[in-house]
Amino acid sequence: QVQLAEFGGGSVQAGGSLRLSCAGSRFSRPYSRYCMAWFRQVPGKEREGVASIDEAENTAYADSVKGRFTISKDYAKNTLYLQMMSLIPEDTGMYYCASVYQVLGMSCPNLGGYGYSSWGQGTQVTVSS
């Protein structure tokens, strides 16, 4: 079973930056073959897809973070990153990384969240105004 662990959350003022990391282990197939994504959730609200990246390094972003967040993968370290710039209070939430094996010829699940099979425990991001 894939294990994911997020790091890098914290408290920051609006306009600041953070970089989240998601260290993965126990992949049964090469890490490069997995769809990886970041999600976030605020208590009382639905989980929101933030960004995803597929085997070919095609990326997708929520409209709310386009131009401010960048998702990337380090294949040597089996680690997923989310570079967050120009943070705003609305970015506050628990951030989760998720993965699913990308079947050859198939696209990754969309940012709705359904279809990702492994999830981390989350890391809290708090942005103050």
Image (cartoon, rainbow, N blue to C red):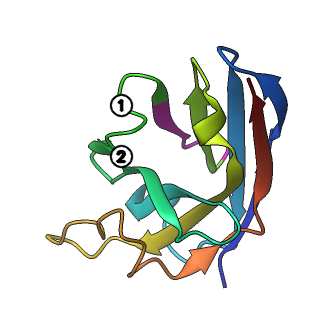
Numbered mark located on residue 66 in the image: 1
Amino acid of disc 1? Lys
Q: Residue at x 51, y 82 (%)?
A: 117
* Residue 73: in magenta span: yes
Specify the quadrant that holds the C terminus: top right
Q: x, y percentage for residue 91? A: 60, 40
Q: x, y percentage for residue 128? A: 78, 28
Q: x, y percentage for residue 21? A: 70, 42
Query: Toward the viewer: 90 or 16?
Result: 90
Residue lying farthest right?
11
Question: Which range of residues does the magenta coloring cover?
Answer: 70-77
**Above or below — where is 71 with respect to 102?**
above
* Residue 105: in magenta span: no
**Above or below — where is 94 with respect to 67?**
below
Q: Residue at x 20, y 66 (%)?
A: 107
Q: Quadrant of residue 115?
A: bottom left
Numbered mark located on residue 96 in the image: none
Query: Toward the viewer: 66 or 32?
Result: 66
User: Residue tagged by mark 2?
Assistant: 62
Q: x, y percentage for residue 92? A: 68, 44
For label 2, the crowd category at 10 Å Cα-Cα, with few meaning under 14, some 14 to 19 and many 20 or more, is some
